[in-house]
Image (cartoon, rainbow, N blue to C red):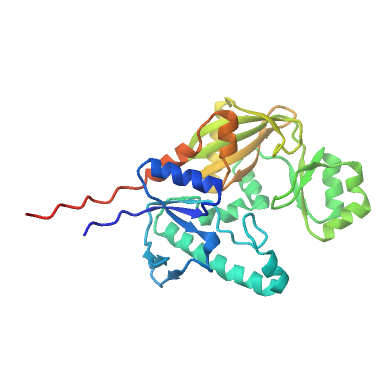
Amino acid sequence: MPTRAAPIVIVGSLADDHCRAVHEGLRARGHEPYVLDAQRFPDELPISLGHALDDIVIDGRPMGRPASAYVRSLYQHPAGYGVEADEAMKEDWRRTLLAFRERATLLSAVLLRWERLGVPLYNPSAANLNITKPYQLALLQAHELPVPATLWSNDPQAVRAFCGEHQAIYKPVAGGAATRRVEARDLEPERLARLEAAPVCFQELLPGDDVRVYVIDGRIVCALRIETEAIDFRQHETSIEPVELPAEVLAQCIRATEVVGLRYTGMDLKRDRHGAYKILELNPSAMFLGFEARAGVEIGGPLCDALCAHARPAPAERAPLA
């Protein structure tokens, strides 16, 4: 019997365009990836974990140690993108949250086991804490990488003091809504009283170019300048084109990726009023299709190449002796 080659795994769903693009790219390179469709778990996808690290069975298939894995999403939260849990939340929100916790714990354990077994993950679960934005920027700053002055707070007095020192913008701590410029009315008592519900991120206004830099395995794949008239470029891009960055800035991008612990990232930079680039954030599962189409660059291809670099074909089956 031939030995089955360790598969390349896609963690996500083929309903997601990026997962589908990676799937097609891997097949074009001679691999048949396995899709761990996290949206199907647990209703339609049986997963069993034994007490040994490599005792992982998914849909009846022993997975052991895959060759590599592209981690798009585990769909771990009922309010997350691609998750349909509205009816369940209305029926019994507490039970639904507990079920999501159990589900997320087991799926996370699969990735943590693979990481412990040495599987190259794009990206590893262990980097998740470094993705938490109030920690990520502090981590980058501690390694002397350029980041904007930022305050995360629910304290009106601290917010007033920060905005008194900086022209500022504000946005959610964890993302998910548009960035807006702080105006005088935002600092009025009734507006700041809303901080009692949740903290907000306040950051110095950076008026210069928006730049997205893609890094894979410590190599710059491309740097793209995003033209926009808006504070938040998302869905407001007028043009996206390749840009050459100074060698020092490229080195900072590679260093930032190492510090955060990512094999693959699309990181956002922006120039301050003095023209210096500041690092806004590193995305652990950056979208790339729109940037490829608008800028005429290739990002998914290098990502597939990186995944394939860790894989090898199964030994060919020998013909029976006559």
Q: Is residue 132 above or below residue 277?
A: below
Q: Quadrant of residue 320?
A: bottom left
Query: Is residue 227 toward the left or the right of residue 190 in the image?
Result: left
Query: Is residue 119 toward the left or the right of residue 21 in the image?
Result: left
Q: Is residue 153 above or below residue 95?
A: above
Residue lying farthest to the left in this orientation = 322
Query: Closer to the camera, 244 or 204?
Result: 244
Q: Is residue 219 above or below residue 62?
A: above
Residue at the image position 82 percent from the left and 45 percent from the top: 162
Residue 149 in the image, given as x and y percentages of width and height: 73, 42
Q: Is residue 218 visible?
A: no
Residue at the image position 83 percent from the left and 40 percent from the top: 165
Quadrant (top left, top right, bottom left, bottom right) of the N terminus: bottom left
Residue 322 in the image, given as x and y percentages of width and height: 6, 54
Query: Closer to the camera, 93 or 252?
Result: 93
Residue 3 in the image, given as x and y percentages of width and height: 25, 57
Q: Is residue 232 visible?
A: yes
Query: Closer to the camera, 257 or 123?
Result: 123
Residue at the image position 65 percent from the left and 71 percent from the top: 96
Query: Is residue 224 toward the left or the right of residue 270 in the image?
Result: left
